[in-house]
Amino acid sequence: MSPNEQIRFLKELSEAMSAASPQASPHSVMEFVFPKITSFLHADIGVISVLGEDFTLQMTSQQGEENPSVVLNEARNCLCDAIANKAVATGRGEFIADLASSPGLPEQAVKLALQEGIAVLVYTPLQAGNRRIGVMIHGWQEPIAFSEQDFDFYEVVGNILGFGIYKTQLIENLKAREEELQEACRAAIDAQEIERKRLSRELHDEIGQAITAILVRLKTLQDETDLELIQDRLNGLRYITAHTLEEVRRLSSDLRPAVFDDLGLVPAIRWYIDTYCSNTGLQINFQANNIEERLPGDLETAIYRAVQEGLTNISRHAQAKTADILLQLKKDEIILVISDDGKGMQQPLSYSNGLGLIGMQERIRLLGGQFDIKSEPDQGVKITIVLPVEK
C-alpha cells in the first residue's frame, strides 16, 4: 500500500460514510463499507464487532471465506472475543506479525487459528473521539509487510468507521426516542381525554342531577303553604346540598387536595393513603425518612402523582392484599419505592398495558430522574423512582 493509495482510499471511505443514508442502520453501514476495507487490505479474513448499549460486544460482521469451516469459525470467535475485549479496554491496537509467538491470547484459539492457516493479525479499536465504539480485526494466511505508517493508516480507517457507526447509532437512537415521545404524547392525550370524560360523567351524574333535584324541590316550595311540609322539604334540600358539596370536595381532592398545598408532600400522601385504604380495604405501610422541609414544587407533584398512579395500578391489576411505600431523602436524591404482594405483571411495561405508568415514567425522565419497574409472575411489582434534589 503506497501513501498515495492510502490517501485515495481514505478519501473514498470518507465520501462513502458521508453518503450513507440517514435511514441506514449501524449494521447496514458496516455491511456496505467493511468489505471495501477488507478488499483494500488484501486480507484473508476481517471481523468487526460493535459495543451495544450494555457495553457488551455484539453486531458482528465478518468477511473472508464464503463457507468457513466450523473450526475456523470457532477460532475466529474465540480470538476475536479476546482481542476485542483487549482493544476496547486499552484503547490501543496492535499488529501481530507472528500469531504463533504472540503472548496474551487464548492458547486454544491461537492453535485453532494456526491450524486454519491464519498467521498474521492486526486490530484497532473503533473510536469516535474518546468514545470506543468497537473493534476492527483483519488477518492474513501469509506473512505481510506492515509498516508503522501502514498501522497509522489502519487506525485512521478505524476512526473513520467508528465515527460513521457512531453517527448512525445516534440517529437511530434519536429516532427511537422521538417515536417514544410521540407515543407518550398520544398516551398522555388519551389519558387526559379519559380523565375528562370521567369528570364530565361524574359532574353530570352526581352534581348535575343533585342540582336539578334542588331546583325542582325549590320550585315546588314556591306555592306551598303547609309549614310542616315546607320544613320537611327544606331538611331534604339540606341533605342533598351537603351531599353535593361533599362530592364537589371529593372531585377537587382527586384533582389536587388542599392538604398538598397547605401542609406539604408527606401529609398529602398520608391523607391519600388513608382515603384509599378506606375505599379499597388494601393495607398500606407508608414510611417517610429525613423529609423535614418542603421539596421543590415539581418534585412534590411528580412524587404525589407517582404514589397515586402506583396505587391505582395496584387496585386495578395486582390483586394485592398489602403494599409498601417508602419515601426517603438521601443527600441530593429523593427516593420513592412502591411495592405490593400481588400477582405481578405478565408482560413488560408498554403503552398497551399501562398508560398511567408510562406517563409516570416520562414525567420522571423529564425531571432528570430514574424510573425502574421490576416484576415476576406471582411476585408482585416493585417501582423505584430516584429524583435529583437541588440544594
Image (tube, rainbow, N blue to C red):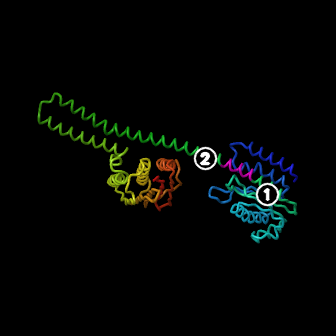
- Judging from the image, what secondary structure is the residue with disc 1 in? strand
Quick check: can you spot residue 98? yes
Tell me which label, 1 or 2, sits earlier in the chain.
Answer: 1
Q: Please give left or right for residue 234 compared with residue 282 in the image.
A: left
Residue under label 2, please give it: 176
**Residues rendered magenta in the picture:** 159-169
Give the amino acid at mark 1.
Answer: Gly
Point 21% across, 29% down: residue: 219
- The circle on residue 300 is none
Point 73% across, 61% down: residue: 92
Q: Please give left or right for residue 365 compared with residue 210 in the image.
A: right
Reply above or below: 115 against 256.
Answer: below
Q: Please give left or right for residue 18 compared with residue 192 in the image.
A: right
Dot 1, how many residues are within 10 Å of its Cα: few (below 14), some (14-19), or many (20+)?
Answer: many
- Judging from the image, what secondary structure is the residue with disc 2 in? helix
- Residue 163 lies in magenta, yes or no? yes
- Residue 67 lies in magenta, yes or no? no
Q: Position of residue 32 (x, y in %)?
A: 76, 48
Point 72% across, 65% down: residue: 82
Residue under label 1, please give it: 46
Cα–Cα span, label 1 and label 2:
30 Å
Q: Position of residue 190 (x, y in %)?
A: 48, 41
Q: Which residue occupies the foreground of this view, 321 or 384?
A: 384
Q: Which residue occupies the foreground of this view, 234 or 288?
A: 288
Q: Position of residue 84 (x, y in %)?
A: 72, 62
* Callouts 1 and 2 close, C-beta under 8 Å: no
Q: Position of residue 242 (x, y in %)?
A: 24, 41
Q: To which quarter of the image does residue 214 belong? A: top left
Reply above or below: 295 against 85.
Answer: above
Dot 2, how many residues are within 10 Å of its Cα: few (below 14), some (14-19), or many (20+)?
Answer: few
Q: Please give left or right for residue 197 compared with residue 141 in the image.
A: left
Give the amino acid at mark 2.
Answer: Ala
